Amino acid sequence: DKLYNYSMLKTTSDKAEQNGGIIWNDLGPNKRPNVMTILNICTQEGLIESDDGLHYRFAHDQILSAALSLIPENKRALLQIQTGQSLLEGMPNEKIENNIFLITNLLNHGLKFASTDNKKRLQLLILNLKASKKAMASFAFGSATTYLKICCSLLGDDQWHNEAS
């Protein structure tokens, strides 16, 4: 239960920073957990770590994986795309370039949501293109290929003609 609460918190934490508070859409006001209480319990249990009491991280990648697995599959992609979109909207361009992999990966989890909105598809295509170029510059050709495949899937047959004209 503590791990589930923290996984929900972690997945929405970047969005919450932008909005000044945690958004728990599926919990009523009386059932919303106290964020600091959850963070303190998870720190005491060794699930998360903090150097300054403001910034938290999972103590191990396996704990992150376990926390994410507790979020229902149908909510996970939506939370990830909301977090990615919030980061994209709230960051200056130079910081976006520094965090291109994080933002693009989060948004790629919500591909099915972006596929209906042409503006978001084009935005995601450009982010994947930038991520592929950065990956190639780092000799991470496998990752670059993945980003480019996503670019191609976002383009679709009709986009080749629309963008070319």
Image (spheres, rainbow, N blue to C red):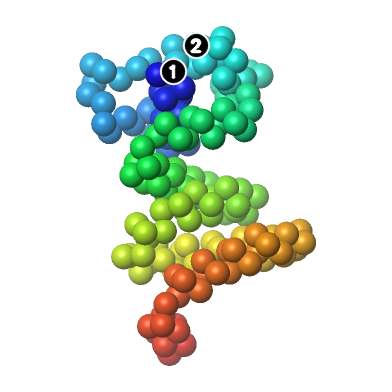
Q: How many marks?
A: 2
Cα separation, mark 2 vs mark 1, equals 8 Å
| Residue type, numbered disc 2 | Ile
The residue that mark 1 highlights is 2
Q: Nearer the viewer, mark 2 or mark 1?
A: 1
The answer to whether any part of residue 120 appears in the image is yes
Q: Which of 152 and 160 lies nearest the eye of the viewer?
A: 152
- Viewport quadrant of the N terminus: top left
Question: In the rendered structure, are the residues bearing label 2 and label 1 in contact, judged by CB atoms less than 8 Å apart?
Answer: yes
83 is higher (above) or lower (below) than 57: below
Mark 2 falls on what kind of element?
Answer: helix
Q: Position of residue 96 (x, y in %)?
A: 58, 51
Residue at 41%, 59% (x, y): give it. 111
Residue 130 sits in quarter: bottom right
| Image quadrant occupied by the C terminus | bottom left
In this orientation, which residue lies closer to the viewer: 110 or 50? 110
The disc labelled 1 sits on which kind of residue?
Lys
Above or below, comparing residue 51 to residue 138 in the picture: above
Q: Earlier in the sequence, mark 2 or mark 1?
A: 1
For the point 45% across and 84% down, which residue is it? 160
Q: Can residue 53 be seen in this snapshot?
A: no
Residue 40: x and y in percent read 51, 12
**Res 64 quadrant in image:** top right
Residue 144 lies left or right of residue 29; in this view the side is right
Task: Categorize mark 2 by other alpha carbons within 10 Å: few (<14), some (14-19), many (20+).
Answer: some
